[in-house]
Amino acid sequence: MDQLRGPTWLQHRRARAFERFSTTPLPTVEEEVWRYSRIPELDLGVYRPLTGAPSGEAVPDGLQPVLDTVEERAALVVVHNGSVVHVDVDPKAAAAGLEVGRLADLDPEGAALGTVTGEANGAFSLLHDAFVADPVLVRVRPGLVVDAPVVVLHWTDGSGLASFPHLVVQAGDDSEVVVYDHSGSADVDALVLPVVELAAAPASRLRYVNAQLLGQRVWQLGRQLSRGERDARLSTSMVALGGGYARLEVESTLAGRGASGEMLAVYFGEGNQMHDFRTLQDHEAPKTMSDLLFKGAVQGRSRSVYTGMIHIGKQAAGVDAFQTNRNIKLSDGAWAESVPNLEIENNDVRCSHASAVGPVDEDQRYYLESRGVPPARAERLIVLGFFEDVLERLAVPGAVPALRSEITAKLDRRDVEVAR
């Protein structure tokens, strides 16, 4: 930890977090928020943080295809094994008030770090804060509409490496920005603990898309927290196709009257993968609205977990909040768990939650097969259609074809297994 670079305030922050981490027990499956997880299988001792400075400014080869999918962009940041290696901001966007780069450079006092997450609690949050190397800041001045996405690319390729990426996005009053955050890796054993903070000021429009395509030997324990002030519009979308055990805690706090939050996700497991989502839609203010739609599929011996909570505070009258989680089981050995929850402290609200876990819809299958579509082709079309209503809502249309191809590749591998 002492070998990590950075300003004095960041070094002090790391030291405080490490001291607290050393006396904080690791979570267990007895805790409700870790129920169904694979946390007993995690051995922190086999991973090491990268303490040296990044080598060069080259974009890793594994990220080149991603650059081709999002060619039009307002800014590009490349983070390699947790450290920023490349920053490129369109000069016109920068002149208009878009700031993108190392947080330590753009915010010398570090005031932006932790504005949404608050003080770290829990072993893995403290571990992240103890070893975060190079946080990234995206800051949009009030009134600025950024016409093209800000692209942040993360790549992990160190065997046995522990990486701690941190992204902070701050959208000023009445501003608008789209951020595309892509995480990939080589085929290595690694641990990634990412944290994302999204702060939407009054009347701002902030849309965030995360594509997670980590290798299947990578553990991810991530947190994504957003906060919307008065009349802000927040949208967070996740496409989780990679990782061995990939966990993401997604929390959206609607703190200002009239704020709204959309939460979307697609996840698809194969082999021994496990995707684990824990969500919170927290309505602190009146006249707020949230809408969550998570769709998943499992095949092989893969597993998925979704547990979600809608919380309506005492002062949050006139709230609309919706939560839907649907899962398709494509193999007998696959398993999915879905647990939606409501906690309502105000009667003047409209809330609903729904969840489903089951095989491919037989009526849809019959409809297609009765019209001459072969069974394997029919099932493929149903799964692709199942995901499409989420994919078509992603705020970065240029990335969708490649993500759709990744889903198709998983179905191709299943067809091969079934044919054996």
Image (tube, rainbow, N blue to C red):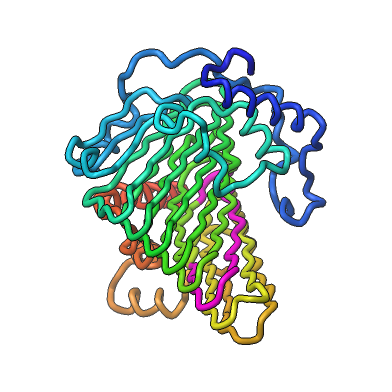
Q: Residue 15 in magenta?
A: no
Residue at 50% across / 44% down in the picture? 196
To which quarter of the image does residue 331 belong?
bottom right
The percent coordinates of residue 236 (x first, y second) are 44, 57
Residue 379 at least partly seen: no
Is 32 rendered above or below residue 213? below
Residue at 33% across / 63% down in the picture? 393
Nearest the viewer among 161 and 413 is 161
The percent coordinates of residue 287 (x first, y second) are 50, 78
The percent coordinates of residue 12 (x first, y second) are 64, 24
The percent coordinates of residue 309 (x first, y second) are 64, 66
Magenta-colored segment: predominant secondary structure: strand
Horizontal placement of 32 versus 192: left or right?
Answer: right
Q: Which residues are magenta?
A: 269-292
Nearest the viewer among 330 and 415 is 330
Is 200 rendered above or below residue 312? above
Q: Residue 285 in magenta?
A: yes
